[in-house]
Image (tube, rainbow, N blue to C red):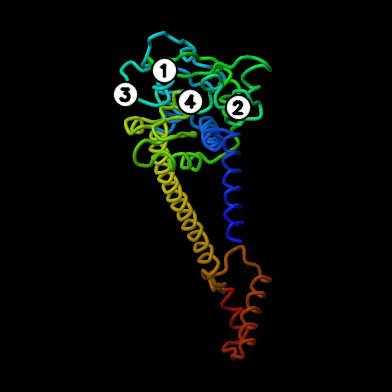
Amino acid sequence: MIKFGLLLVTVILVFVESEDMRDYNKDDYKLLCDLIGAAVKKWGEVRESGGPLRDALKRTLFGKESENNDLSKLNFPEDYTKKVDGDLKNSRKHWCGGCTEVGQKHHPGESALHDLVCLCAPGQYGWPISGDDEKKLCGKNQSNWILTGGEMKGWYTVFLGEKDQEREQMSETWETIIKDCVRGGDGNDLQTALQAITEKTRKVGVQYLGKHGSGYSCGGTAGDGVCVRYPPECVRNTWWKELEDAIMKYKEESEKEDTEQKKSESSEKGQKLKASKGEHKAQRQSSHSPQPASRVSFSPQTEGDTPQEAEKLISNITGKHREDSSLLTMPQRFLWAVLLI
């Protein structure tokens, strides 16, 4: 029973490794691609504004030195295809694995798109997908780079002289992989996508994206790996470090604006409530104020007074006294005499 269990575990481990080799760099490709999609979406929101987040997103998508900020014009950089014999500092080994060479045009961590080229461009003779169309690199098989029966040279740095021997299939990498990620903004949360990457790249020492072995330089050969290498001197100046800091500042500013907005709305609501209470109080006071009582006038009769009016007045007086159950203290004749004086 124990032997059977060990055999089963061994078979499972071999199967997992085999699947990983048949879809090379699949997981890290997805991390970068998801991040690029989220960055594209956020770029559409902040492109016309200023501030650290816009600058960090521009670097993530276009590179720090690029003058372009239009995704529709995001074309394959020309200097990626210019192989110069003897140009040791501008080889795949340095562009994808180091930051120390003076005059180096590109470096790992320069932009998310640059790192994706390092992660997904086939290496020496198409390694690791050469000779087998069933194998995949970053989710794509060999037919995405060459026609059936064609020769795949790849992009790699030779060991002797440390210069690039070939720079083929780089433009195909840009068209088939990079642009798919740029077009594929599917609403991923930018901070969540970034955190998934920094969890892998913030460890102590040299960090990698892509399949690698100990001491791999990411030069594109089977012995150096198709990967991105981030030594400590590169980590300090990476697109993800700048983007991480910018997102934190953006969140702090947004929370501050929300707090001020809530205070303003609360103050405005309080003023309206106070004014409304004042109106109700004034209305209540008006409805309960005493009305002037009607009085019987004993003023002398004017020329306009008529006997009918006088008689009506006397009737009102006597009637009011009787309703109150009080005695009439003077005769009605006497009242007539008073009114007619």
Outermost residue, top side? 85
Tell me, for residue 100, which label it has, or none.
3
**Quadrant of the frame with the C terminus:** bottom right
Q: Which of 181 and 11 is in front in this view?
A: 11
The CA span between labels 2 and 4 is: 16 Å
Determine which residue is flagged by label 2.
180
Q: Residue 100: x percent and y percent?
A: 31, 23
Q: Name the residue under label 1.
A: 91
N-terminal label among 3 and 1: 1
- Distance CA(mark 2)–CA(mark 1): 25 Å
Secondary structure category for the residue under label 2: helix
What residue type is disc 3 on? Thr
* CA separation in Å, label 2 and label 3: 32 Å
Q: Report x, y in % for residue 107.
A: 39, 24
Residue type at mark 4 is Cys
Q: Distance between the residues labelled 4 and 3?
A: 17 Å
Q: In this view, does 316 lie above or below 105?
A: below
Asked if labels 3 and 2 touch by Cβ distance under 8 angstroms, the answer is no
